[in-house]
Image (cartoon, rainbow, N blue to C red):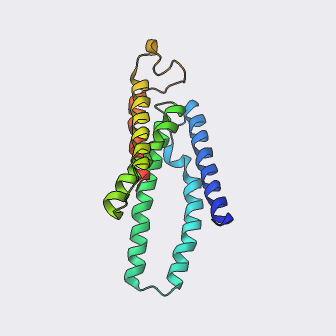
Amino acid sequence: MKPSILAHGQGCALLTTATGACASLLAARGVDAPTAQTAFVYAALALWGGRDVVAGWRAKASASERLRGVGAWLALAICDVEANYLVVRAFQLTSLTSIMLLDCFTIPCVMVLSRWFLKADYAKQHVAGAVVCVAGVALTVASDAAPVAWGGAGAITSPGAAPIRGDALCLGGAALYAC
């Protein structure tokens, strides 16, 4: 693997982590602006992705290929914006711990979509890993639904106003991230 690809991936992971931490801090202070909170990330992505789009146009692609490429990027951008909105909004309603755990639901979603659309095959170990992930999601939601006296939401972490609704928003965002 090229070092530049690894560095790019690590940079994206660092920005994603910083976005989540900042969203959690803002939510704790009562700030409710999910789309504005990720505006910088989208500006950076537009500059980076715009460079690739222009490079594709210079490659003398036909008008229909250009339009199809822009349409695909637009559809992916809409899914990403909505996913980010849902996850950042979830910070207002549930705990950071729940969001970090539930956001991993993207992995089984990607596996299902790649099976349907790309006809990908997975080994038993991959499927077992996805099942463990879904079981973890179920246990996280059950923990948030459990009463505080049983060690549920609020016993260890500081929950938001509606942890189950926050969990649902986070799961919806994770599913959209898979697109």
The residue at 60%/39% (across/down) is 21
Q: Quadrant of residue 129?
A: top left
Location of the N terminus (image quadrant): bottom right
Q: Quadrant of residue 122?
A: bottom left
Judging depth in this view, the residue of 151 and 122 nearest the camera is: 122
Give residue 5's position: percent from left, percent from top. Answer: 63, 64
The residue at 43%/24% (across/down) is 143
Residue extending furthest toward the left: 116
Residue extending furthest toward the front: 124
Task: Count the labels in the image.
Answer: 0
Give residue 54's position: percent from left, percent from top. Answer: 54, 77
Q: Considering only vertical position in the picture, is 133 above or below 120?
A: above
The residue at 45%/11% (across/down) is 149
Give residue 33's position: percent from left, percent from top. Answer: 51, 42
From the viewer's perspective, tell me whether residue 77 is left or right of residue 118. right
Give residue 14's position: percent from left, percent from top. Answer: 64, 49
Q: Considering only vertical position in the picture, is 66 above or below 87?
A: below
Location of the C terminus (image quadrant): bottom left
From the viewer's perspective, tell me whether residue 44 is left or right of residue 134. right
Q: Considering only vertical position in the picture, is 41 above or below 148?
A: below
Q: Considering only vertical position in the picture, is 39 above or below 64?
A: above
Judging depth in this view, the residue of 178 and 88 nearest the camera is: 178
